Image (cartoon, rainbow, N blue to C red):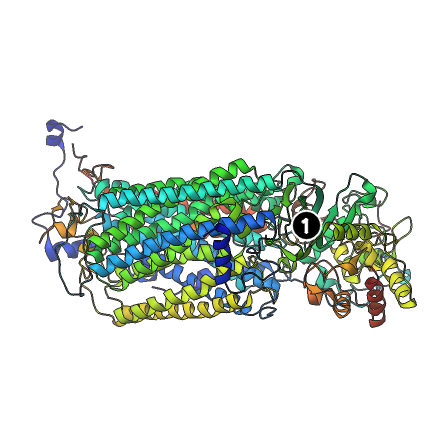
Amino acid sequence: MTLRGAAWALLAILPGGCAGAQNALGGEGAEGSNFVQLFTVFMIVCAVMYVLITAGLLIALWRRRQPLTVEDRRHHETSSAIRPALIGWTALVVAGLTALTVASFFTDRSNAANSASPKLSLTVTANQWWWDVEYQSADASRTVHTANEIHLPVGVPAQVTLKSNDVIHSLWIPNLAGKQDLIPGRVTDIQFVPRKTGNYRGQCAEFCGIQHTLMALDVTVESKADFQRWYEAQLKPAPPPATPQQLAGYRYFATRECSSCHNIGGTPASGQIAPDLTHFASRRSIAAGTLPMTRANLARWVADPQAVKKGNNMPTIGMTDAEVDSVVSYLETLK
Amino acid sequence: MSSRFPARFLALGLIAALCGCQRENRQDWNKPHARAVPATSPDTIFPGGAAVPPLDARAASFEGNAHVIARGQQLFATMNCSGCHSHGGGGMGPALMDDKWLYGGRIDQIAASIMEGRPNGMPSWRGKLTDQQMWQLAAYVRSLSGQVRKDAVSARADEVSNTPPQTQVKREPVLPADGPQ
Amino acid sequence: MTTAADKAKAPPIDVPRDGPDLTGPKLEKMLDKTWASPPGFIGWLSSVDHKDIGRRYIVTALVFLALAGLLAAAMRLQLSRPGNNFISPARYNEIFTMHGTTMMFLFAVPVMQGVQIFLTPLMIGTRATAFPRLNAFSYWTYLAGGCLLWVAFLLNIGPDIGWFSYPPLSGPQYGIGKRADIWAQMVTFTEIAALAAAVSLVATILKQRAPGMTLARMPLFVWATLVTSLMVIFSMPSVALASSMLLSDRLVGTQFYNPAENGDALLWQHLFWFFGHPEVYIIFLPATGFISEIVATFSRRSIVHYPIVVLSLVGTGILAFGLWVHHMFATGLPRVGYSFFTAASIAVSVPTGLQIFCWIATLWEGRPRMQVPLLYVVGFIFTFVIGGLSGVMIAAVPLDLQLHDTYFIVAHFHYVLIGGAVFPLLGAITYWYPKFTGRMMSEGLGKVSFWMIFLGFQLAFFPMHIAGLYGMPRRVYTYPAGMGLELPNLLSSIGSAVVALSVLLFVINMVKSALAGDRADSNPWDAPSLEWAAASPPPRYNFAHIPVVDSRTPLWDAGETISVVHGLRVDDRELLLTSVMSAEPDVREPSAEPSPWPLIAALALTVMFVGSIFSPWAVLFGAIPVSIALIAWFWPKSPTPHPEPTIA
């Protein structure tokens, strides 16, 4: 049985093992797929050890079982078979563990080799409780600034520099790779080599405060052409409002509380401390993966963010229904 | 053997009760306060010796609350108050950690200053921040001159050290606006 | 060195000592009087009897277990379906913090130390621990720390930053209010308590063993106690330092964990986990001691390859200090260093694997009797080995980077802690119950409890492995639907209800048996070690005469009578000290009388520590009553005549 075959067998017995946009058994990235293979190796070796130990225990209990009242000579002699068994067992354990350790080292090297020469460069900065994402480019006018989402071209190694503005967070996109912490005052990095297109989900994996639970991000792995299309769209500034309602929403956004924190490229709203909203409507979710992107959810969020994600840094302003409608209409144009 | 001895628990309970729940109250931030300027006045001299207007009713829920002061500290940094006020020492704007208050040093007077703006460069934040955020800022500003009980402030921020530890700041008196300079 | 001339000048020996002419009921009556605690409530508070202190530790720890278990039930209720809002986010964060903190600091280590304090002097054939008042002080300090934490939680100022409280989240800017300070100061209390108990245990084991009980003849539980106590002494200072530095950052604005001022958030992680990893072995190794004793008794033979088991204990204890970075594999430290910690973390399972072999070999070579304590051993092996193997998995960096901070880890550590420590503990409580209380626990009820908790545990925690693989991180108060997490979480919640009921059943068994269980004689299980020579429960003085041993299984090899030594005073508290390696009699040493000063010192310390949460001046002014209490505690007693020179 090949290793791949064993991995598929493992997935088959776990219910729903192949499904899931946030699933460590997905193996859709280079490191993620190495994980599935190594995990399968470990599972086989560990299962064998477990069967040996529990079988040994059960046989030991069964073969000399006695009714409770039987007295027997309490003895200390040990049969001669025990010592060779001990030596054999020790050798087996050491051999097994050494094999696992070596397998782990080789996987580490494979992961390092896979991500050796990245072609794409991003910086993710974690905040309580959202992700700031910036795509680097040699030409500074071609950097893309977005939030709570990552797009990756399939098959292209990407290097992600990780920083934090406040407390320790952890970026985890299980379908693609393992996790890495974002630690204030330090710069860490993680590499992705996505192998299959699809929509995935990442989540913060280090407890970071009251809304750690609702700090996720949407990950899209797409063909190189689609990625390029997306990238070019991101470089454009926000489209101007067309209808009177959108204009009213734009006016509110640009002159009132929203612009104190948020940025929309090409408008006077240039706050730097909240997610960049220039192409907000093109994202799959709101508030770092908390709500799917629909008009109703947008209205719910804008009207009362504290009810959706209590304790997060976006205040409930107390807008009127008309104000909410107009702002939401404007936000929907930000594709 | 497991009977509890009351004295120990009483002592501990008393100590813990003194810790105060007001300090640890997480405010509901989805109850926007009415958009009204605090009914106060910045100066303290009134013709005919009239009384200083009473403290705004909202003040009580913002004083001495660690969460409010922490939010205010965060807003002070992100709204770039230090651009004019430095970290309390003043620059283009007046110092916030001393005893001189041009427009009053009570929490409602400070909130009114932030809301309305003041001459010589203090912008009005009405419509740029929510009322609650402005009160949070006011609470933090009060802590810069030591007006707040020490167990509700944090000793330092996680940044380059720019103030003495806030838990050690001496409480400055709040002098009237036209008092001795 | 005394000469014959000195002996001639020595005053006549005229104090009553046990011996051939002072034995039996007359001796016991005199010893009872000497070793009694003073009457009344003050006497109860002043007791320094290690059995009292051990029982107090165990009962208090079980209360904390129940409280933390209720919190777990609340969490499982919240997580039983996606999008549940039974508990608010802020409250959930407090609950998981309190659950972990209580279980690790207020239940796991104290219950093990409690059993160690109770059993060690009985197992090595002495009358008291080396530092009885220090033991009492350790209990009161532990109780104070536990009360601080729980009173704070009930007053809604409990910590909410996780049981290992990483800065900057627990630091002065993001750890708002006094919650993190309460957590950090509770750590100080429990660390001092654990250190005090450990110091006393090490001295007791090294210097007070019965004559003839060489290190090679010591019961394996005593070996486990020795290794564990040494580990406590080396690891606890690290966490005390880390938490003191955190308190200092929060109270007076030092910069230990502030990266902007050249501090480091990772400094906390290193210091904490340098303690944190040995901590789990501090919890696990005493459990292996329980298993060794139970397996020997219920196989009706001594443990196979005793030296291997001892070396495994020592080896695990030493290796445990070299593993801590495996909690930090995701922090971006140099990968070469990680490889070392992978190898060490995998290697530490080898000694434990050897111990497991020796236990199974003992059962193989013996005549096993399937009574409740042995059932728990079986449950331990079935459960702990799964946890150990999942631990081998997460020791590998590529696997850990996916599984770290997910429910896979939650499953792993519950398998090793509940399977590896709680199951042996329940077996040990059942086994030593006659020694604690003089009665036997109900065998029938015990079997039902065992099967319920064993099966309920598997149902509760096995699905968590799946939940982690399917993308569920730790410390989340809810999860989205459609990720395949509904079924594992529902199963876990149902299983946790079964576990809760079974623990309740166990406690009912304990209470019922204490009140009306079958009375036990001194050795109801026909066990080999010395504690079963004393009555059930033992009198205050443990043994009427100090026994002499010449094998690892003294009660099996002694025949009808056990050799004893004579000569200890009966009118004053006196112990026999023996040499460290070969346990030859060395000196007679007085043992401390009951005293209220350990309690008063603990109270003074409480005031000082709780005050220092709010003001640094409390450290200065609080030191005054602490000093007064310590001076009164150590004030030398007027010496009663001790005419005996050291034995030449």
Residue found at the far left of this picture: C21
Tell which of C439 and A303 is nearer to you.
A303
Q: How many callouts does the rendering have?
A: 1
Is A277 left or right of C312, judged from the image as shown?
A: right
Vertical position of residue C464 compared to residue C222: above or below: below
Is C100 left or right of A292, judged from the image as shown?
A: left
Q: Residue at x 33, y 64 (%)?
A: B1
What residue type is disc 1 on?
A: Val
**Percent x, y for residue A283?**
75, 59
Q: Is residue C548 visible?
A: yes
Q: Is residue C305 visible?
A: no
Tell which of C598 and B117 is nearer to you.
B117
**Percent x, y for residue A28?**
61, 53
Q: Residue at x 78, y 58 (%)?
A: A280
Read off the residue under disc 1: A154
- Residue A80: quarter of image: top left
Q: Residue at x 47, y 37 (%)?
A: C340
Vertical position of residue C105 compared to residue A116: above or below: below
